[in-house]
Every structure is written in structure tokens, then in C-alpha cells.
Amino acid sequence: MFSRASILTLGLVATGSLVAAGPCDIYSSGGTPCVAAHSTTRALYSAFTGSLYQVKRGSDGATTNIAPLSAGGVANAGAQDTFCASTTCLITIIYDQSGRGNHLTQAPPGGFSGPEANGYDNLASAIGAPVTLNGQKAYGVFVSPGTGYRNNAPSGVAKADAAEGMYAVFDGTHYNGGCCFDYGNAETNNLDTGNGHMEALYFGDSTAWGSGAGSGPWIMADLENGLFSGRGSGNNAADPSISYRFLTAALKGQPNQWALRGGNAASGSLSTYYSGARPTASGYNPMSKEGAIILGIGGDNSVSAQGTFYEGVMTATYPSDATENSVQANIVAAKYGTTALTSGPALTVGSSISLQATTSGYTTYYLAHTGTTINAQVVSSSSTTALKQQASWTVRAGLGNSACFSFESKDTPGNFIRHYDFSLLLNANDGTKQFKEDATFCTQAGLNGQGSSIRAWSYPTRYLRHYNTVAYAASNGGVHVFDSATSFNADVSWVIATGFA
């Protein structure tokens, strides 16, 4: 006989056959149904067969919807790969599975304008966060600074001091101290409208308002004008620094009560980091929640944060710990796992390479440097020794993510290619987290069918490109001149040759 917890975790259909329940089936069984359910990796209801998300490709602007492989199953990553072959793709819509139509789309400008020409936020790369669930490939939402999604007019999301709950599965290794990598309840006008007007999960290592044990990153609650790890806006030693590759974060609130919980999304149970009264500062008790939904940004469209989102929901009323524990068991049973971040021609760490342009009329050009400027220069076997060295790179394991690569200068050891304001520079490794991430690149099969294309790990919409013989981290049709869609696929495709030096 199954216990109540087992039935909640697995789900019992009318026919009497036992099937795997989704998180929202579990919440519904607990009396706290989902009012929003977002995931690009899997269905969150056992019977859900609809669209999980939409992607748009750079070659012709066409879109397609990605659904689960079967009812309640993992996303059909193969359909995305086929649709996006030989071009770039962006995630344009993250559909709400609850039936309320609370879809997330490109966030509009607010207190902070987005980086797009019209002030909107960037959209996420469709391939920036590959994972597996029970061995099946899927893609998460890789949020670089400047990326954000929002819905300012959802249905059923808690307002004012009404009770609600939420959880999200994040990448516990992808974060920064920017404001604010959030998922949850926010303002409906994209502005900071005061204390208590938000209730959203935050993940990162900002210490501007609150903190937890150690140096972070931490799960905290963004309640507007404060990131809270506990009752006050200071330190809560019970809120631990996180090191899990896959992280479950949970937040819930009701009149004069809120709780913050978390755990390893790949194993084990949830722990409670705070449960108690609302913050003592003015405006947080009672709350003044407005009921918009955000992902990757703050309530006023603060866009300097980074992180990765795989799935998350928001509920009506305040879920019990027992219900959340069953949801955590379901997440663990989904078996999130890592997969390769690179594809195409293999690179060998420690080898010396040169990168040959494939654009018509530029095939005698190789990626080189002049001082700190990365550029494309004509190089051949008869070139000077100095130029050959400047066009040669030692492949290193990625400084910011060892699943990708970094490229060390052959003639100035200790200096690496990095992007800075989307220009490519040769700079000395200063050991900072920022530098290591800026100097990490992931390879894939060349977009024009030749060699490899090399995308920035921390900005996977951006590829190493030569444009007017200068090198940039460029996006396909972005706002900068060097983002021009003309000849993009050729300009970002490089033949990997044995190093000149």
C-alpha cells in the first residue's frame, strides 16, 4: 500500500493505474493549486501535452513551439535542434502550463531600460543551458545580464497581502552579485513602487541588502527595496551558501508569515532557512504585492544579474511543508543531469591552434592580436615569427567553466581572449570570477557548415566574429553595428588549424 506522501509524489489516476505526477498535480492535491507553471525542460502536470516554450530562429525569423515528448514528459529537444540547425535561436515565449495564460515574454523597459534599441530586455539563447532529465536532453533558460521575461497582467497571482507559494530550479553555479536574478511576484508597471510590492525568489551573492552564511551565493526573497534571508535585512546565518549544480529554491508568504527553503534538486530533501514573521521595516507587513510575474530581472527591470532557470511555479495560497517536500521528491525523481556544452570538431586542451576565417574573400585571415586588440590578419607560412605567434593560441580548459575552453596567447602567456563590452581583447588573467567567465567560450559546429563557431559561455547569444577585421562577441542581428545579420554565419565560423607557432 502506498502512503499519502507516495501518492502525492507519484499521482493516482482515475483508472487506478499509478503514473508519475507533476509538481502542479502535487500542489493541487495539497490544496494549493498552481496559478502559473513555467518550464522549458519538462511538463509540470502529468497530463500536459501542450507547448512548453517558443523559439525563433535567426535565419528567417520563423518560430516554432516545443512540446514534451509525451504527456507529462521531457521537452522535445530534438525538435528544437532540427528547427535551429545552422542558425541561431532565441527563446521568445515561456508558456504557462496552468491553463491561465500566464505566459512569460520579452520584458519591457521600466525603471531600468533593457539593452535592446527599444528598451526591451534581451531574449535568452535557446542552446545556452543544455541538461538531461532521466537521460533525455532538454534546454534551460540561460539568463545573461540584460536578459529578462515578464507578464504584467497575469490571472490569479496573489495581490496585496494574499497568500502564495513558489519554487524554482536554478543552476547553483551560475550567478553574480547584480540585481536581480528573480522569479516570482512583482510590480505591474516595471517600476519600484515601494517596500512590500514584490515577493520573488532571488539567487546570487549580492550583499547590498542581506546575506547568509559564508560568501554566497544564497537563496533570498526579493520583497522590493530589500533582499531578505531572514526577518531583518541583515545576515541570517541559517541561510547557507549554495554549491549545488541543480538547486531547488522555495518561497511562500501569507499575512505576517513567510518562509524560505532550499535543497539539492538532484538528491535529498528541502531545508528551511527561515520561517517566521514578516520583516520589521515599514511596508512589509502587510504586504502590497501587485501580481506581475518576472524571470531574470528585478521588479523595476533591474537587468544586471545572471543565472539559469529550468522550471518554476507559483501557487494560490500557502503550501504546507509536506506538499513542498513531495514536490522536491518529484524534482529529484526527474533526475536533472549535466551534458556536453560543446559540439562539432573536437578541441584538445593543451594543443596549439590557429583559427582561419571562412568568409568568402577572407580565407587567408586568421584570428590574431595587435597589442590587446583581437583582430583578423592575413597570416601564412611565410609570415614573420612574431605574427605567427600572435595568430596562435593554446587551448585551455575554460577558466569559468571547464566544460568549455579558454584561449591563451602563445606569445604572451598568461593572457587570454576575453570579451569586454562585447569587444574581444587580450588581457592578463587577474583571477577574478568576472575575468574567468569573460574568457570562457564554447564551441559548436560552424553555422555556415565549415569548422566551428565559438560562442561566449556567459553570453551564449554572442559568437566570436570578425567584422571589418576586428573581433567582437556578436549576436545575430543585435543592436550594434558588428551584430549585422549580413554574412553572420560565415563571419562566426572558423576552421581550427594546427597553430602557426
Image: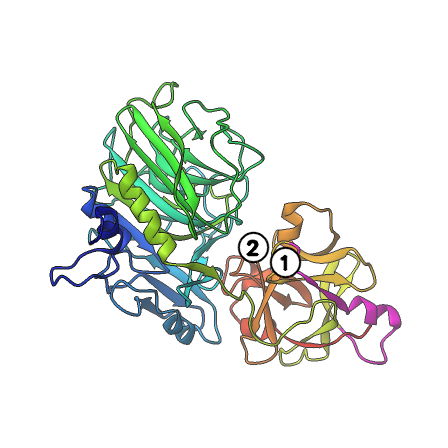
* Residue 348 lies within the magenta run: no
Please report the bounds of the magenta region as a residue range: 378-399
- Looking at the image, the residue that sits furthest to the front is 1
Q: Is residue 313 visible?
A: no
Q: CA distance from mark 2 to mark 1?
A: 8 Å
SS at badge 1: loop
Residue 8 higher or lower than 489, as above or below: above
Image-quadrant location for residue 46: bottom left
- Looking at the image, the residue that sits furthest to the left is 14
Of residues 111 and 283, the one drawn nearer to the viewer in this rendering: 283
Total numbered badges shown on the rendered structure? 2
| Residue at figure coordinates x 28%, y 40% from the top left | 322
Percent position of residue 480, x then y: 55, 58
Label placed on residue 5: none
Please identify the quadrant where the N terminus is shown: bottom left
Which is more N-terminal, label 1 or label 2?
1
Of residues 486 and 500, the one drawn nearer to the viewer in this rendering: 500
Q: 464 left or right of 478?
A: right
Label placed on residue 458: 2
Image-quadrant location for residue 379: bottom right
Q: Is residue 252 visible?
A: yes
Percent position of residue 419, x then y: 64, 55
The residue to which callout 1 is attached is 440
Q: Residues within 10 Å of mark 2 (few under 14, many from 20)?
A: many
Callout 2 touching callout 1 (CB < 8 Å): yes
SS at badge 2: loop
Residue 208 higher or lower than 481, as above or below: above
Q: 158 left or right of 206?
A: left
Q: Amino acid at mark 2?
A: Ser
Percent position of residue 266, x then y: 43, 53
* Residue 387 lies within the magenta run: yes
Q: Amino acid at mark 1?
A: Thr
